[in-house]
Image (cartoon, rainbow, N blue to C red):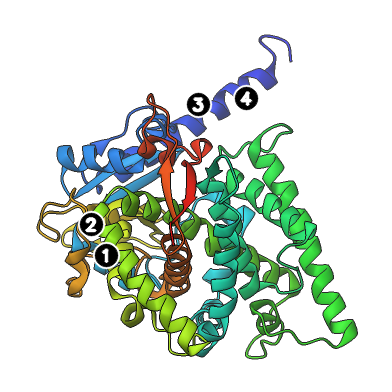
Amino acid sequence: MEPGSPWMWVASVLGILAASSFLFWNQHQKRYLPKGNWSLPIVGETFKLRREGIQKFIRSHTARYGDLFSTTIMGRTIVCVSNPEAIKFVLSTAHSSFPEGFGMQHSRLTSQGVFRGPGHPHFRRIILQDTTGESLQKMLPFISSTAKKVVDEWENKESVHVCSEMNKYTFTVMMRVLWRDVEPDSAEMVNIRETMGMITKGILSIPVNLPGFSFYKALKAREYLVEKLMTTMKNRRKDGVIVGDALGAHMAIDQFKVSDYEICCVMMAFMFAGYITTATLLPWVMKYVNENPEVLQHVQAEQEEVRQKIVEDGSLRWFKSRSSMPFTSQVIDEVLRLESIVAVVPRRAETNVEYNGLIFPKDVYVWCSAYSLHWNPKNFPNPSVFDPSRFKETPKPMTYMPFGNGPHMCPGSELARVEALFLLHHLVTKFSWESLSSKQRSATDQLRQPAGGYPIRVKRLIP
């Protein structure tokens, strides 16, 4: 295109019109939104968020602008809500006014919007059935034996990178729920786990679909897993095999028409959610328990009683997480409060929604800040102090939501707690451990940066 050519003028005019339209739309939205820092056009505060981390980002903005503030992240207008009443309003209407609000990367790499249709209640019910009640009770021996195997393998290692080990543990348990065709210790399981790891990196990356970028690699990884799931479903039907896992339950849906590809999308979403949050939680649990000697002693005493009960009874039919391990359950609740594994619950306004004189414009993303609730001294006095006794009593409604709330609340929350309980059980009854964090980087720093892995060394307890 030569300088001064008609096409160059057309392109320039179109560019100006596009920029003007965006700025007009941007300013139009600002009229209805709470105060905030809009920073650079489109990019907004993306780099600030990545640099500070979501918890520090929310803390600093809430201190400056109050419990409702607006910002721009990667081209999206976002309103962050820390007020309990406002959070309740947003999450309680999630099925209509505020559908899920995960980013484009998450949608393209996992569900691709299938949860917004009529199938959502059915998909959710299937996972709830497989991760609670009688189904979870039947899973207990597998979870316990898997946790035991993981912990036992640590004894003869010079160092253990806990974050990596927890990915393996939680992924194995999750696959038992979702997709049982893959053997736990097989090379295929390792391959699928590594492939899912690439997808996870893509979800957290900048969405550039070009060779060499994480998002591009994640899309290729997704294609591979979809093909494997399709093949599994084809073979099950061909051989007349019925498997009692979530994949089989989705294949048997008859209330409405669901395609094999939609089943793959549902499975991808649950595969991601089913291990990543629990794998993030467990290193924090180990860190807080080990750094608080009185808590560790109390946990050890409780778990020794559980160990004797298991030996005497010979089964786990009697086990109930909160009543069988009450103090250890309180420890996990307190870690979930302090670290807010799900720091924000994202939603998107499907239409203009009014709340207390504030309008959430259509297509604005809303972050319901669980972190702000958990660190509010009105809800939890001295919020920076690790104190499991807070959870002797049930917290007030809408002050504690570690797994979200409303119609999209994580259906695997009870499974996650059980995984944490059994890992701690097999760890504290056999071993002590020490952090190998460098002097330059604390254990907390290494946990917040996954590459650090929270390295530890374990030592068998004296009988």
Give the residue at mark 2. 294
Residue pointed to by mark 4: 11
**What residue is rendered at 23% in x and 42% in y?**
59
Residue sitting at x 46%, y 53%: 280
Q: Residue furthest front?
A: 463
Question: From the viewer's perspective, is the residue at label 2 or at label 4 nearer?
Answer: 2
The Cα–Cα distance between marks 3 and 4, rounded to whole angstroms, is 9 Å
Mark 1 touching mark 3, by CB under 8 A?
Answer: no
| In this rendering, position of residue 139 left or right of residue 334 | right
Residue type indicated by callout 4 = Ala
Q: Secondary structure at mark 3?
A: helix
The image position of residue 236, as x and y in percent, is 83, 80
What amino acid type is highlighted by mark number 2? Glu
Q: Which residue is mark 3?
A: 16
Instruction: Report if the CB atoms under discs 1 and 2 are less than 8 Å apart.
Output: yes
Instruction: Specify the amino acid type for callout 3.
Output: Ile
* Secondary structure of the residue carrying numbered label 1: helix
Q: CA distance from mark 1 to mark 4?
A: 70 Å
